[in-house]
Image (cartoon, rainbow, N blue to C red):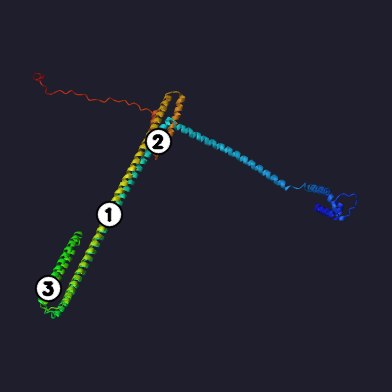
Amino acid sequence: MKMAENAKASQELLTRCPKRCQGPSTTRQPLVVSRKLYSRFVDYTTENARLAEIADKEVQRLSDLKDASYEVTKDWNDAIKNLQRRRREELLSKKEKAEQARIKFAKDMAVKNAVERAEIVKEARKLLFYKKPQCRLINSALFTSETYRELHAQLAFRKKLRGIELERDNMYAELLKKDTEDFFRKEKEKAEQRLQRTRNYAIELKKQIEDTKNHLKKLELYDAKADQEDLDNMQKESKMIEECEKEQIRKKKEYLKKMFLEQLEEKKRVEEKMREEEDIQNRSIEAYRNTREHLNQITKQKWKEEQENKIKRSEMLAKKCATAFETDDTEEEERFRRAAADKNKLEEEKAQAKRQFQEKMRVDMKRYEAEAAALKLKRELEEKNLIEWETHQRYKRDEYNKEMQVKAAKEGERRKKEMAEFLKKQMEEQRAIRKMESIMDDDSQEIQKAIQRTNDRVLAYGEEVLEESKDIRPLFPIIKAIENFKRENRLIPLKTAETMEPVKRKRRVRKICSNPTPPEQIFYLG
């Protein structure tokens, strides 16, 4: 700040006297400034020395204060040093404890490793001992016992599997039986439904027959009424046509006869056609033939009666017309035309009703035939699906049999290889046994002791295996192997040879004939 103030003062000085400060001049002139400005200028020129002096004084003051503080506190306890010392001691104690723990751990681990190493060495020696020919005999017996155990387990499993398969076959048979019962039950229900539909149709047909009878009765009443009306009209008109000429009556009779003959021929053709249709319908619908024939007989009888009545009415009308007088031809023809039209209309209505009935019967037959065809197609489809399913099952069974044959072949090859390896091992064991026998033949005391120790260890191992195999696997192979080992190593006392007494044989007694032949009676052949 002072340096800035001095610089500012010098700048003001230059601005106040620019001419005096621009450069050297030949004449000397006095510098006129204020005291304050002069003091500032002096301070600016001597600032470095002044600052150095101030710094020296400050250093001296601090050193004096430090000396005074040291003199005052030289007898006091230092908390920081105490804390540092305590921390150092704690760190050293921790390091010492860690070192002791490490040494202890190393010792413990060494002991533990030694124990583990001893166990490992013991196990290794044990495994090496188990690989000796004497132990291999027991191991092979153990393997045989384990094989028997697995064989028994496999037999039990196969027996269980056979039971499961038998149970599954029984379940499948029960399922097939149930499906068959369901199928027959459904077929029975369908047959009952068809029978019920047939009964319903028969009831409906009876109703239709009753309706037809009622309709025929109504038609008869209507015809009787119409005949009565015609008769009344004819009686009224008979008075008007009494003077009809014989020629007109003859012509009218011929016309009526011709018309009636045409109607009769038409009716015959219709009847022939109806007979043909009835024959076709009778061949297709045998179940309803009796009802239809009965209905046709009733219809034919009614129709014949109607025709006879109409012919009678026409003849009576013709007789009346013969005695009647001649009327207007146009009116007479109109009346005959109306009568013929009414008759044709009634016949067409009857034929239409009969055609409708026949068409309905034909539709019902087609529907029944379609249902029968659909049922037959469904049965054929079910049989086809059953055959395809059986074919698929046989194909799958063949595939499974082929897979099992391949597996059995692979298993046989594997067993052959295992048997070859097992035989090789047995050959090696036999060589080792022969070598051991050659060693055992040596009668030196050390060798006998070593052999005795080895035999004891082998017997101990055999007893261990025997105890371990109790209630787990068959024991007779292991017991047999131990006995063979004892017998081969002469650990079982030899049986004393029992003195065999010779079997007493019965002396053969020479048979002598009680009735010998005299020499003179002997006859020699040849």
Q: Position of residue 153 (x, y in %)?
A: 37, 41
Q: Write the residue at 22% across / 63% down.
A: 361
Give the secondary structure at mark 2: helix
- How packed is label 3: few (under 14 Cα within 10 Å), some, or many (20 or more)? few
Residue furthest out toward the left: 521
Amino acid type at mark 3: Lys
- Tell me the quarter of the picture where residue 397 sits: top left
**x, y (%) of residue 74?**
77, 46
Residue of label 1: 377
Q: Nearer the viewer, mark 1 or mark 2?
A: 1
Between 160 and 305, the residue placed more toward the observer is: 305
Q: CA distance from mark 3 to mark 2?
A: 133 Å
Q: Position of residue 56 (x, y in %)?
A: 82, 47
Q: Which mark is residue 281?
A: none
The answer to whether the residue labelled 1 contacts the one labelled 2, judged by CB atoms less than 8 Å apart, is no
Marks 1 and 3, the one that precedes in the sequence? 3
Mark 1, other Cα within 10 Å: few <14 / some 14–19 / many ≥20 = few
Task: Kindly report which numbered mark, 1 or 3, lies closer to the viewer in this rendering.
Answer: 3
Tag 3 and tag 2, C-beta contact below 8 Å? no
111 left or right of 32 in image: left
Helix, strand or loop under label 1:
helix
| Position of residue 132 measured from the top left corner of the image (x, y, whole percent) | 44, 30
| Residue topped by disc 2 | 143
Few, some or many residues within 10 Å of mark 2 (<14, 14–19, 20+): some
Could you give the CA–CA distance between mark 1 and mark 3, rounded to whole angstroms? 68 Å
**Vertically, is 234 above or below 180?**
below
In this rendered view, identify the residue nearer to me: 499 or 321: 321
Q: Which residue is mark 3?
A: 251
